[in-house]
Amino acid sequence: MIYTRFTIGLKNNNTLIGNSFNEAFGLKVSVSPNPARTWVAFTYELPNKESDGLIRITDISGNVIKKFIITEEQGQQVWDTRLVKTGVYIYTIISNGLSKTGKIVIN
């Protein structure tokens, strides 16, 4: 099966429509705590038993702060934020041509 990544700038109840589309095909992620101080846990599930993926974290200017390579269909990745400046960060989880994006607040 071939999936196409959709990037849609429309919003529906503060959720990007593209994120909902990608989640419907099995790409799921939850982030907690958010806001955070010392760590953030990404709990994820990749689509169609996929075991390859990436979590990319950028600052508000688009500079890549951290990348995590995912090698399991589902699991949890913890980000130590103790050395990160206070602010808003954007995370994107990518797998099999699908992606889901959200924001993290570090206090």
Image (cartoon, grey):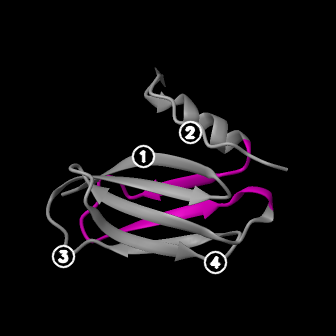
Give the residue pinned by disc 2: 19
Q: Is residue 39 above or below residue 63?
A: below
Sequence-first disc among 2 and 1: 2
Tell me if 15 is positioned left or right of 49 in this view: left
Badge 4, how many Cα within 10 Å: few under 14, some, many 20+? few
Badge 2, how many Cα within 10 Å: few under 14, some, many 20+? many
Q: Is residue 31 one of those drawn in magenta?
A: yes
Sequence-first disc among 1 and 3: 3
In the rendered image, which quarter contains the C terminus?
Answer: bottom left
- Residue furthest to the right: 1
Gap between marks 1 and 3 measured at Cα: 21 Å
Give the residue pinned by disc 3: 83
Label 1 sits on a secondary structure element that is strand
Give the residue pinned by disc 4: 71
Please say if the residues under marks 2 and 1 sit with CB atoms less than 8 Å apart.
yes
Sequence-first disc among 1 and 4: 4
Question: What amino acid type should be assigned to the residue bearing mark 3?
Answer: Leu
Gap between marks 4 and 3 measured at Cα: 25 Å
